[in-house]
Image (tube, rainbow, N blue to C red):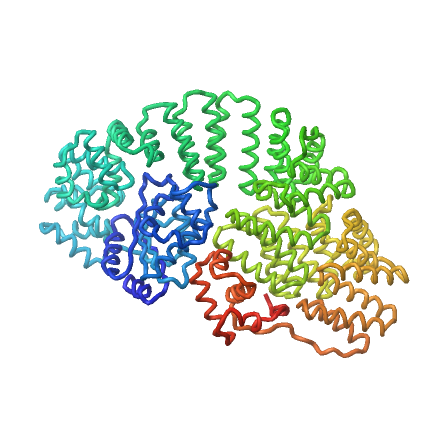
């Protein structure tokens, strides 16, 4: 397999492999074999170090240092991201996915000369930031001549799912041969069999277990014991260590405690501890340590055996010596870590150094490392007041790192101290944020509400932000948060006005709370100001990134799909520019919903594909709102029904009430298109549960009006219309007024209904909402046919049918065809499904290239390298029979995928 991997890389292909197996099974030996076979390619190496797991990007730095001469070739955002994480430049902490894309770009650039092999040993000890970045790169390699090989006992979660080679113990015959090569005097075959069986053919165990045991012990099997294999291997190393000179043992301990493998640091610390050069010879003679350009142990178990066997006093002395010889200017963070490990008790000076290291780690994007430094600073703090502040800071960093249990434990540490009122409020706020981040929305709102109330007397600005967080948590909780939402809004409305000019976040909170307490008429002008502030330049980038999703919700509430679509597009660009890619899937989904609602199904399908790309890269879990709407509008019953059922099942497991509402709304649209009105009515009733008629419940009301009217339930239809009108009238948008007129026509008769249908068609014609406009023509045509006005009905139904077919709304277009047939006009049934040789990703790349994006720009958007983009475009050109990007506009004219399936 390794020979095949290096051959593929030489041939210009990408390969990724995780070599996995227990301790001592031979993973490192296999990597050595691979390195020997790769003499004609460029090789870079890194190794995970247990004591470095808290230092962000430590392993990535090892791997990338030999490649940094190509850094200048990267696009500026990518170059700056790596400069920040490697401490070569200043700036805000880059998003971790931008770091991943930059690393992918750097690897791709290096291959311009010759193929590249990246080898990472002991991957189980990678720091989290490096593991995430390298896992990202491994999944995005496509057309680069790169081999990325990891060796790990048990791969970290970031590497799961990658191609793997399971290395198992030797076969029985080979195991006996290896054992016989080191122990030639075993007379008892049963003991030999026992050794092979208990080691399960593990080569290192077979070599190391017999060391230090007498022939009698081996012959009778009395020295084998019954401890686990890894413990037995480690014990064999410990037995060998016990026979070494004291200086040699001390040198090994220095090497075990020094994570970088720097021989200069090793000898400086050895000199400080009085260890002579002779100790090196003994360590190397025993085959335990090699000192060259780097200090390496024969096996990771030697490191762990040495370190764990040392007394606490010896470990502290070793770390102190390493701290004293580590340059405080060049490497202050490792120095602080050594000092902290050497500390015998609370030490304020070291705690301060750890705080500073946490700040630097945070600036490099190492949130997990920042949390680790802050946690250690808490343990070294004696002063009760400072201990509380540091525990809260550590809890905040742990929350950002996604370590929710650790964050909760640190809150408990803070609460054990003497807290002032502001600190108690911060504890409440953090607890609420942790609970909400954990996905327990119904529990989060009361906690955030409690924090906001405490903050009112302490910090009004922070209190308003807490109330806005609580509003979002309550809305996300759905039915379970209705009472909490009302309570949040009443409390927030009672706050005194800001002393100075209201911030955009204040305006947004005011608009959203009044929406619940005073109704849409009172809230509408405030929400418009908030939307303007967030879409313009008034809101800061931090405000837009943190609360932009609530500003998007405000646009939906105001029945302004066109403005929402534009706002989402700007938010997506902002997230990309800022490198804040974790929020990107949410905005892509929102834009996908707005785009599908406008009838641009081709663009919506591309956005859904992009959501898949981003969520695959980020690990985000976003309900498929856009895909639900797109499939229901298309009328694709099997696919839509399957996705609706899957979404409802997942929402039931996770408590995502918003996903339930979206799925039921999609079902109502699907069944109205299919003419199955009883099912549409049932789904719409479940979707429109919200007493406050917020999105998406309120957008289900038109479906309920239509279904109830068709089912002969006029009272239910009128009740739904009255609720709908209370949402559309304050909005005063053409979209809202058009939907209101169309729905009112369904519960009206005679000339009034006729005028309302015409009004709806005119209002919706002014918007981008082509599906709703086409449905207005359809409903008007159906009403005219039932009124006996066949010729007029044909005009409306023909218009509806042509629009629905052009958009790709198969179920609704079939409904229009049947109605036309009922007027006596024959219409050939049309199949909107077309075949296309382009894959979804090729289609997406072709579309972006057609828009004029360069290969690097496309790569940044889709989380692939520019070489992979080039590879896909070559395939696109071949399939389309063209030879350049200029010909894409001719080969793919406007509307080229309008009627194609998603």
Q: How many marks?
A: 0
Q: Residue at x 69, y 54 (%)?
A: 561
**705 above or below 878?**
above
Question: In terms of image quadrants, where is residue 90?
Answer: top left
Residue 500 position (above or below residue 441): above
Q: Is residue 805 visible?
A: yes
* Outermost residue to the right: 751
Residue 699 x, y percent position in the rendering: 72, 53
Q: Nearer the viewer, residue 601 or 831?
A: 601
Q: Position of residue 497 (x, y in %)?
A: 70, 30
Image quadrant in which you'd find residue 495: top right
| Image quadrant occupied by the N terminus | bottom left
Q: Nearer the viewer, residue 864 or 434?
A: 864
Q: Tell me: residue 431, above or below residue 570.
A: above
Q: Tell me the residue at 44%/42% (across/down).
A: 365
Q: Residue 395: x percent and y percent? A: 48, 33
Q: Is residue 599 left or right of residue 93?
A: right
> Can the viewer see residue 153 in this picture?
no
């Amino acid at each position: 397999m390794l020979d095949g991997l290096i051959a593929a890389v030489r041939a210009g292909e990408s390969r990724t492999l995780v070599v996995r197996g227990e301790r001592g099974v031979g993973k490192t030996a296999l990597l050595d074999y691979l390195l020997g076979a790769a003499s004609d390619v460029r090789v870079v190496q890194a190794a995970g170090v247990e004591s470095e797991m808290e230092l962000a990007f430590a392993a990535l730095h090892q791997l990338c240092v030999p490649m940094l001469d190509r850094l200048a070739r990267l696009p500026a955002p990518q170059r700056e991201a790596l400069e920040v994480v490697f401490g070569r430049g200043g700036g805000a902490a880059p998003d971790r996915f931008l770091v991943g894309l930059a690393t992918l770009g750097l690897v791709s650039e290096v291959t311009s000369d010759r193929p590249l092999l990246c080898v990472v040993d002991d991957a189980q000890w990678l720091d989290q930031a490096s593991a995430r970045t390298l896992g990202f790169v491994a999944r995005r390699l496509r057309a680069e001549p790169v081999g990325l090989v990891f060796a790990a006992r048990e791969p970290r979660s970031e590497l799961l799912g990658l191609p793997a080679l399971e290395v198992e113990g030797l076969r029985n015959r080979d195991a006996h041969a290896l054992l016989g090569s080191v122990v030639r005097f075993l007379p008892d075959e049963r003991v030999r069999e026992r050794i092979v069986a208990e080691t399960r053919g593990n080569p290192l165990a077979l070599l190391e277990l017999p060391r230090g045991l007498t022939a009698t012990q081996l012959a009778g099997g009395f020295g084998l014991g019954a401890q686990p294999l890894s413990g037995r291997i480690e014990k064999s190393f410990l037995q060998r260590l016990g026979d070494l000179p004291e200086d040699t043992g001390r040198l090994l301990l220095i090497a075990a405690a020094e994570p970088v493998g720097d021989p200069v640091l090793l000898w400086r610390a050895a000199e400080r501890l009085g260890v002579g050069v002779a100790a090196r010879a003994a360590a190397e003679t025993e085959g335990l340590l090699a000192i060259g350009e780097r200090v390496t142990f024969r096996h990771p178990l030697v490191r762990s055996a040495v370190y764990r066997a040392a007394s606490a006093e010896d470990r502290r002395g070793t770390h102190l010596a390493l701290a004293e010889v580590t340059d405080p200017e060049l490497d202050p963070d490792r120095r602080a870590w050594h000092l902290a490990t050497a500390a015998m008790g609370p030490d304020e000076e070291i705690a301060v150094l750890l705080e500073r290291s946490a700040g630097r780690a945070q600036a490099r994007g190492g949130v997990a490392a920042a949390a680790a430094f802050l946690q250690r600073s808490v343990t070294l703090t004696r002063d009760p007041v400072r201990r509380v502040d540091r525990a809260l800071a550590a809890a905040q960093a742990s929350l950002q790192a996604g370590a929710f249990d650790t964050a909760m434990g640190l809150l408990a540490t803070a609460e054990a101290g003497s807290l002032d009122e502001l600190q108690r409020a911060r504890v409440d706020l953090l607890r609420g944020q942790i609970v909400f981040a954990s996905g327990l929305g119904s529990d989060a709102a009361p906690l955030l509400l409690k924090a906001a109330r405490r903050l009112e007397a302490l910090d009004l600005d922070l209190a308003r932000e807490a109330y806005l967080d609580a509003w979002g948590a309550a809305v996300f909780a759905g039915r379970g948060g209705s009472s909490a939402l009302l309570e949040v809004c009443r409390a927030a409305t009672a706050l005194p006005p800001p002393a100075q000019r209201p911030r955009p976040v204040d305006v947004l909170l005011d608009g959203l709370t009044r929406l619940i307490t005073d109704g849409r008429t009172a809230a509408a002008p405030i929400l418009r100001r908030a939307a303007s502030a967030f879409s313009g330049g008034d809101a800061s980038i931090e405000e837009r990134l943190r609360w932009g999703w609530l500003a998007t919700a405000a646009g939906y509430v105001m029945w302004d799909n066109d403005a929402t679509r534009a706002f989402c597009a700007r938010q997506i660009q902002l997230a990309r520019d800022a490198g804040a890619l974790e929020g990107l899937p949410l905005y892509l989904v929102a834009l996908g919903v707005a785009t599908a609602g406008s009838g641009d199904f081709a663009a919506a399908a591309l956005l859904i594909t992009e959501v898949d790309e981003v969520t695959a890269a980020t690990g985000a879990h976003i309900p498929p709102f856009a895909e639900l709407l797109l499939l229901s509008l298309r009328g694709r019953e099997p696919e839509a029904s399957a996705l609706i059922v899957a979404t409802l099942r997942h929402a039931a497991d996770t408590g995502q009430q918003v996903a339930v509402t979206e799925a039921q709304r999609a079902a109502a649209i699907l069944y109205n298109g299919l003419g199955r009105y009883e099912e549409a009515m049932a789904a719409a009733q479940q979707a429109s549960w919200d007493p406050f008629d917020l999105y998406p419940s309120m957008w289900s009301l038109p479906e309920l009006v239509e279904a109830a009217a068709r089912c002969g339930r006029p009272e239910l239809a009128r009740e739904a219309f009255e609720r709908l009108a209370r949402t559309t009238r304050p909005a005063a948008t053409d979209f809202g007024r058009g939907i209101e007129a169309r729905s009112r026509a369904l519960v009206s008769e005679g000339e009034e209904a006729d005028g309302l249908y015409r009004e709806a068609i005119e209002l919706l014609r002014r918007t981008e909402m082509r599906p709703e406009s086409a449905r207005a023509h359809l409903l008007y045509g159906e009403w005219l046919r039932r009124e006996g006005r066949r010729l007029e009905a044909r005009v409306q139904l023909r218009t509806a049918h042509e629009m629905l077919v052009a958009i790709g709304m198969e179920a609704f277009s079939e409904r229009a065809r049947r109605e036309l047939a009922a007027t006596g006009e024959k219409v050939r049934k049309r199949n909107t499904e077309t075949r296309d040789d382009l894959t979804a990703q090729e289609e997406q790349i072709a579309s972006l290239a057609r828009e004029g994006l360069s290969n690097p720009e496309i790569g940044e958007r889709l989380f692939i390298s520019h070489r992979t983009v080039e590879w896909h475009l070559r395939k696109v050109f071949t399939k389309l029979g063209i030879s350049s990007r200029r010909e894409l506009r001719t080969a793919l004219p406007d509307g080229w995928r309008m009627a194609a399936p998603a």
